[in-house]
Amino acid sequence: LLCMQPAAGFFPRRPLPLIPGYLRATRLRGGGGAVAPTAMASRIAVVTGANKGIGKEVARVLGKTPGVHAILACRNPALGQRAAEELKRDGCDVEAMDLDIDSQASIDAFRGKLQSSYPQGFDILVNNAAIAFKGADPTPFGEQAEPTIRVNFKGTVAVCEALTPLLREGGRVSTVASMSGALRGYSDQVAARLRSQLTRDELFEVADTFVANARAGTHVQAGFPSSNYGVSKALVIAYTRTLARQLGGRGILVNCCCPGYVQTDMSSGRGQKTPAQGADTPSFLALLPQGSPTGEYWSDRRIQ
């Protein structure tokens, strides 16, 4: 996933000490064989977009965490099963299930299967699935806007709305955002609105306003930057705060992060971090101890 360096002073850095116990909690289990599935797991994790890249590496970390069973929620069933088998051979407690976050029918079917398989609920949701048009893609900017916002923002919201009711008290939501979601290139009015405590419906209004103006070629005049992916991630960051307020009463921690500039298909293999390194902060947020911050945007395990 693409992640640019922050503009000075844009996200005020608030250094937070690394939370004790995280490395102990994620120490790898010995042995190379597949571990016994689910029967011994005390926590169930769902990772979207987990057949490759950052999502797969997050599933690896969680699947090797004692007491955690990770579900690879993947759009492509064959690739999901292949990734799950690879992780099992590496000693991970995992399974694959089909999920296309761009399809409400798929989301509903996934929810039904999850609820049937784990009627007591689950504990960790990692929102990683996303799309990005390549820089050389000939699709006009205005035509890229709707699918990018639909998948990255509205699809993530749809997954959260379907699955968070199944999260057990004290659960975790960790969402992969990007520094491209920084509010650079916005008018003061639009930036201020995105920083405010917007409701879910108000965020959808902002999203639809951007898409309409992108199609009309008036998005810059309307106060938006020329980055469909960046706007989608700005909306995801804002939604993190909205969801944190909604779920706080159940002790559920909701955070998002920039994974860094990672060598994935989305970045065409460019980047300063490996997928395993990019998975570090999303995994860290998925395993935060109770009493940790919520509704925050993180990078390198620190609040920005």
Image (spheres, helix red, strand yellow):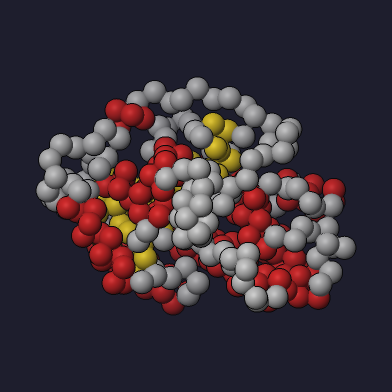
Spot occupied by residue 303 in the image (x, y as percentages of width and height): 57, 33
Q: Residue furthest right?
A: 221
Q: Quadrant of the C terminus?
A: top right
- Decide which of 238, 226 is in the foreground and name it: 226
> Residue at left 50%, top 43%?
272
User: In the figure, 296 relative to 151: above or below?
Assistant: above
Spot occupied by residue 91 in the image (x, y as percentages of width and height): 18, 47
Residue 27, quarter of the rendered image: top left
Residue 302, quarter of the rendered image: top right
- Decide which of 69, 246 is in the foreground and name it: 69
Q: How many marks?
A: 0
> Residue at left 55%, top 38%?
298
- Tell me, yes or no, if residue 205 can be seen here: no
> Residue at left 30%, top 57%?
71
- Decide which of 38, 53 is in the foreground and name it: 53
- Decide which of 7, 115 is in the foreground and name it: 7
Spot occupied by residue 73 in the image (x, y as percentages of width and height): 36, 62
Spot occupied by residue 110 in the image (x, y as percentages of width and height): 36, 68
> Residue at left 25%, top 64%?
82
As drawn, is 271 to the left or to the right of 92?
right
